[in-house]
Image (cartoon, rainbow, N blue to C red):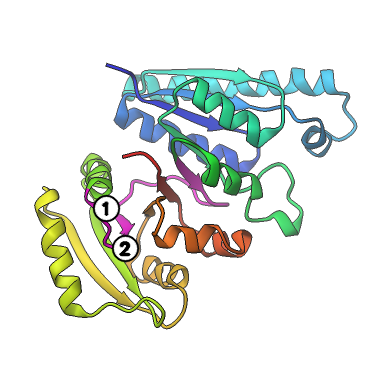
Amino acid sequence: MKTYTILCPTDFSECSLNAIEYAAKLGEKLQAKLILFHVPDREDYENLFPGNILDESLHTAKKKLQSLKATVEEESLAKGLSSCEGVIQEGKTVATILEFSESEGADLVIMGTEGINEFKENYIGTKSSQVVLKAACDVFIIPRKVFFKVPRKLVYATNYLEEDKLAIQRVVEIARMYDAELDVVHVSTKIRSIDKALHISMVEELQPFIHYEKVNFVLKSYRDEPGLGLENYLITAKGNILFTLSKKKTWFEQLFTSNLSKKMSYFINKPLFVIKNL
């Protein structure tokens, strides 16, 4: 049986270190192989290590990566993580992450929403946005200043598609790991309205596919865009992680294909797990 593989790109920023903690903790539960992956990019290096020549910067990066690997092994191998590797591969950041994840058969990419460049116009992490959109595997993005804590409530955003039945089962597996509640939420707006009777009938279709006691079905009305409604729900319901299915005809496209940066800023305070494979 193939070992579940988590790829965690890191640029050694605080944000990416938080992502490593999430990757290690989830890796413990999944008995996964964790790959810490650093992509040296000349332009990024000039920001990360100002004044250093490239060879010196690479040497520093290798030492940092080995230190992170050793820390993860010390903390997580005894708790269920299968293995941890540190890999450096030069190239353009996004393209290299995507190519490496495919070549390694990664099941999940976990990364922070901020890259090396911390200029204000890039504060929500354009590189992680591109990985979310283009990766072949699932992607879990960890926002700035979000530190790991055991999740007590997971939120799955549904548009009541046939594929939701399989996706929700995936989320239930993670909920079971942490004995967490799962809220399956549909956000109804002026543009995409849904009445209670239809909501009830769709819930009745979904329930036979879910074998978990701690699942709640929620119909949430919000006057504006579904992204804002979900953000509002996450805050009021104290959700720890938002899950969504990245398939055609879902609200995911509304969030990420138009005005990408603005849309992603909705979730700057909550981790977002994007399911891409069922």
Residue 166, percent across and down? 24, 45
Q: Quadrant of the N terminus?
A: top left
Question: In the rendered view, would you say 30 is above or below 126?
Answer: above
Secondary element at image label 1: helix
Rendering quarter of residue 99 = top right
Q: Nearer the viewer, residue 227 or 136?
A: 136
- Residue 187's x, y, as percent? 34, 71
Q: CA distance from mark 1 to mark 2?
A: 8 Å
Instruction: Please report the residue visible at 43 percent of the width from the left and 31 percent of the height from the top.
Output: 24
Pointers 1 and 2 in contact (CB under 8 A)? yes
47 lies left or right of 156: right
The x, y position of residue 189, in whole percent, is: 38, 78
Residue 116 drawn above or below residue 204: above
Q: Residue at x 59, y 19 (%)?
A: 87
Q: Is residue 107 left or right of residue 93?
A: left
The part of the chain drawn in magenta is: 139-165
Total marks placed: 2
Question: Is 241 covered by the magenta stretch?
Answer: no
Instruction: Decide if residue 168 is in sight here.
Output: yes
Residue 149 lies within the magenta run:
yes
Q: Please name the residue shown 63% across and 55% down the image.
A: 124
Residue depicted at x 31% and y 60%: 158
Depth check, front residue: 39 or 57: 39
Q: Position of residue 139 (x, y in %)?
A: 46, 41
The image quadrant of residue 214 is bottom left
Tell me, yes or no, if residue 11 can be seen here: no
Q: Residue furthest front?
A: 248
Query: Which residue position is annotated with label 1?
Result: 164
Left or right relative to 114: residue 30: left
Q: Which residue is mark 2?
A: 159
Q: Which mark is residue 88?
A: none
